[in-house]
Image (cartoon, helix red, strand yellow):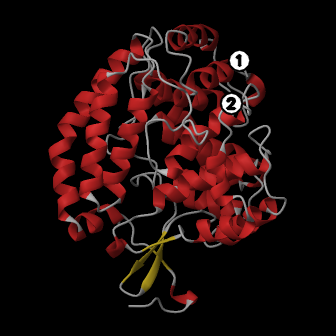
């Protein structure tokens, strides 16, 4: 059934998730997910052990990331089964030495999916020490024209689950990565089309929902277009555009209203709080602070204090080990997001304490303990130098 006119766009019902709907349409993928989950957890536990020993697990982690995406966002069970086989092989060879980039110049050596290759490549290509003349990033040519870029991004905004794909994760990763690369003219040595900046800025301005202030994925359901408010997408756009987005008062109202809802349309994962989501929330509060009403600031202070208490009491052990992690999150990622949350709220640096004038006398000791733990991890993981930089920013 075709969609009705644009005015038929409505908010998705609170608590609705596309994943159960996709599983009903494609029961084989749901069956594979249930059967493979214990093995995936065993593989991830093994990778945790390797990472704690300083081994490079990037390739295997990328394969597991692709597998989780296929199980959660697609209906193709055969493709997911092939990735599981690849993940097993990579995990068993996590101590091996392998190239950092593939033949197209991406850092996504463990995945065959273009947007995951893009996501694996963005942080390394943003780095000042990126070397452009070794394996040039030709994989970027795919969207290096205003028409190709806009067609690609617009094609991701609406998902029709009966087609066997939920575009939400690709939309999130692609916009976050391409905004940074295009607007910062990175990677060094790569020539972006001169019309790309205008193309992506125009897309973003049209994509933000003025009713909620949020960015999100849309779904075709029963002839209507259901619109979601996505925490991660909104965080990415606010952060990578330095807060230069619109509708901040409505955005903060929405952010506070979804506090107890499930990610990506709320703050909580299946297990409850995570440092990753808390970091996203803190960043939105920090960018929105100058435009927030007095009552919004009062609520934000209360929430940041609550998130900080959980971080210090639950997420980090006294010796500096990060204990609380999101599902599928690597050890380097868990340290980065925990440290990034603390950095954003000014725990280490009083100049960043936009929300309070409190003093945190324990901060220097905790910073030292976290730094010692991060230095034990493999430097090939992009989150390791990023975490270290956050500790001293």
Q: Quadrant of residue 143?
A: bottom right
Q: Secondary structure at mark 1?
A: loop
Q: Quadrant of residue 37?
A: top left
| Quarter of the image where the C terminus is located | top right
Q: Secondary structure at mark 2?
A: loop
| Quarter of the image where the N terminus is located | bottom left
Mark 1, residues whose alpha carbon is within 10 Å: few (<14), some, or many (≥20)?
A: few
Q: CA distance from mark 1 to mark 2?
A: 31 Å
Instruction: Indicate whether 89 appears above or below 71.
Output: above
Residue at image position (74%, 40%) is: 187
| Mark 1 or 2: the one toward you | 2
Instruction: Indicate whether 229 appears above or below 1.
Output: above
Mark 2, residues whose alpha carbon is within 10 Å: few (<14), some, or many (≥20)?
A: few
Q: Give the label on residue 134, or none.
A: 2
Report whether 18 appears left or right of 193: left
Residue at label 1?
392
Residue at image position (68%, 39%) is: 136
Q: Position of residue 314 (x, y in %)?
A: 40, 24
């Amino acid at each position: 059934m075709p969609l009705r006119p644009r005015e038929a766009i409505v908010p998705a019902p609170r608590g609705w998730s596309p994943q159960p709907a996709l599983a009903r349409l494609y029961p084989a993928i749901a069956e594979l997910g249930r059967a493979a989950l214990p093995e995936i957890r065993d593989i991830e536990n093994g990778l945790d052990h390797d990472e704690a020993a300083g081994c490079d697990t990037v390739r295997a982690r990328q394969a597991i990331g692709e597998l989780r995406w296929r199980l959660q966002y697609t209906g193709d069970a055969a493709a997911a089964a092939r990735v599981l086989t690849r993940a097993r092989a990579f995990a068993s060879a996590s101590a091996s030495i392998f190239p950092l980039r593939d033949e197209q110049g991406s850092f996504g050596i463990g995945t065959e999916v273009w947007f995951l290759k893009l996501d694996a490549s963005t942080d390394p290509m943003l780095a000042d020490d990126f070397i452009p003349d070794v394996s040039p990033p030709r994989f970027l040519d795919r969207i290096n024209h205003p028409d190709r870029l806009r067609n690609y991004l617009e094609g991701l905004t609406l998902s029709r689950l009966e087609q066997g794909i939920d575009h939400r994760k690709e939309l999130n990763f692609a916009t976050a990565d391409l905004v940074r690369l295009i607007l910062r003219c990175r990677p060094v040595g790569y020539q972006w089309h001169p019309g790309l900046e205008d193309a992506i800025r125009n897309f973003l301005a049209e994509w933000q929902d003025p009713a909620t202030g949020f960015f999100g994925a849309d779904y075709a359901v029963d002839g209507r277009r259901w619109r979601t408010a996505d925490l991660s997408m909104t965080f990415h756009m606010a952060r990578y555009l330095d807060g230069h987005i619109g509708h901040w008062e409505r955005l903060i109202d929405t952010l506070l209203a979804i506090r107890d809802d499930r990610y990506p349309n709320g703050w909580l994962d299946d297990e409850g709080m995570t440092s990753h989501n808390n970091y996203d929330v803190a960043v939105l509060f920090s960018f929105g602070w100058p435009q927030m009403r007095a009552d919004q600031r009062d609520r934000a202070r209360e929430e940041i204090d609550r998130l900080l208490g959980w971080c210090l009491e639950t997420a980090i052990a006294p010796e500096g080990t990060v204990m609380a992690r999101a599902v599928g999150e690597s050890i380097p990622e868990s340290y980065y997001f925990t440290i990034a949350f603390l950095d954003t709220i000014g725990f280490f640096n009083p100049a960043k304490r936009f929300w309070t004038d409190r003093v945190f006398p324990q901060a220097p000791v905790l910073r030292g303990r976290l730094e010692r733990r991060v230095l034990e991890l493999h430097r090939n993981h992009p989150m390791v130098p990023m975490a270290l930089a956050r500790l001293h920013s």
